[in-house]
Image (cartoon, helix red, strand yellow):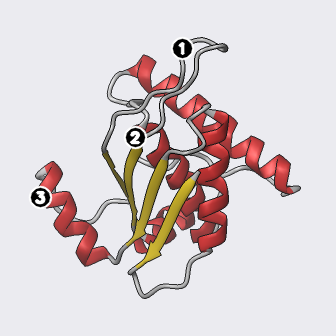
């Protein structure tokens, strides 16, 4: 799996953890190991510009996903996944910090960024949360991936609750 993490935000983030959880999520979703992903960490001003440009919504947001080849997880266990360019995930640590502090299970900015990375990966793979059934599926899968990664890393304590909108 080729995953690039580029921090342009000016804020120190745990880039290795972002890389690790993205790799874990893609493996868990059975995405081809030669597929490519880019994660870009930007400041609030840059995120606000993207949010306005692509969603026509004011203010910065937490995560945005820009799919490229519209890869999907294989439907069957014996199906070979296609390789390709997954796309870009853009994260905003300033928004992540605020969300982590305001979450019911208060957690750090880096924990929130890991959650948002998984959220972004799922959006790249075609998952959405507009409808109640889609939301239940996506957030359930997101929690399972984050919990699985945390268990693999030996992290204890409560997992961060979803705070993405």
* First reached walking from the N terminus: tag 1 or tag 2: 1
Task: Residue 106: name its quadrant.
Answer: bottom right
Q: Position of residue 15 (x, y in %)?
A: 59, 72
Q: Which residue is mark 2?
A: 124
- Where, quadrant-wise, is the C terminus in this rendering? top left
Q: Which residue is mark 3?
A: 53
Q: Residue at x 40, y 40 (%)?
A: 124
Task: Residue 38: name its quadrant.
Answer: bottom left
Specify few, some or many for label 1: CA neighbours under 10 Å numbering under 14, 14-19, or 20 or more.
Answer: few
Label 2, label 3: how far apart the Cα atoms are: 19 Å
Mark 1: secondary structure: loop
Which residue occupies the foreground of this view, 25 or 105? 25
Marks 1 & 2, CB-CB < 8 Å contact: no
Task: Residue 74: name its quadrant.
Answer: top right
Q: Position of residue 20 (x, y in %)?
A: 67, 59
Which residue occupies the foreground of this view, 126 or 74? 74
Q: Which residue is mark 1?
A: 75
Apparent side of residue 43 relative to residue 10 in the rendered image (left or right): left
Label 1, label 3: how far apart the Cα atoms are: 34 Å
Residue 162 seen in the current view? yes
The nearer-to-camera label among 2 and 3 is: 2
């Amino acid at each position: 799996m080729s995953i690039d993490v580029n921090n342009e935000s000016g804020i120190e983030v745990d880039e290795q953890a972002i890389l690790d959880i993205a790799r874990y999520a893609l493996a868990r979703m059975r995405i081809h190991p030669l597929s490519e992903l880019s994660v870009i960490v930007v400041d609030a001003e840059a995120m606000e510009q993207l949010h306005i440009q692509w969603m026509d919504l004011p203010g910065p947001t937490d995560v945005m996903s820009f799919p490229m080849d519209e890869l999907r997880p294989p439907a069957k266990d014996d199906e070979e996944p296609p390789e390709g360019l997954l796309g870009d995930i853009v994260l905003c640590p300033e928004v992540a910090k605020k969300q982590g502090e305001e979450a019911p299970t208060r957690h750090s900015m880096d924990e929130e960024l890991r959650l948002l990375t998984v959220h972004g990966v799922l959006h790249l793979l075609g998952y959405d949360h507009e409808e109640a059934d889609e939301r239940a599926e996506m957030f359930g899968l997101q929690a399972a991936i984050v919990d699985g990664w945390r268990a693999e890393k030996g992290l204890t304590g409560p997992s961060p609750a979803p705070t993405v909108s």
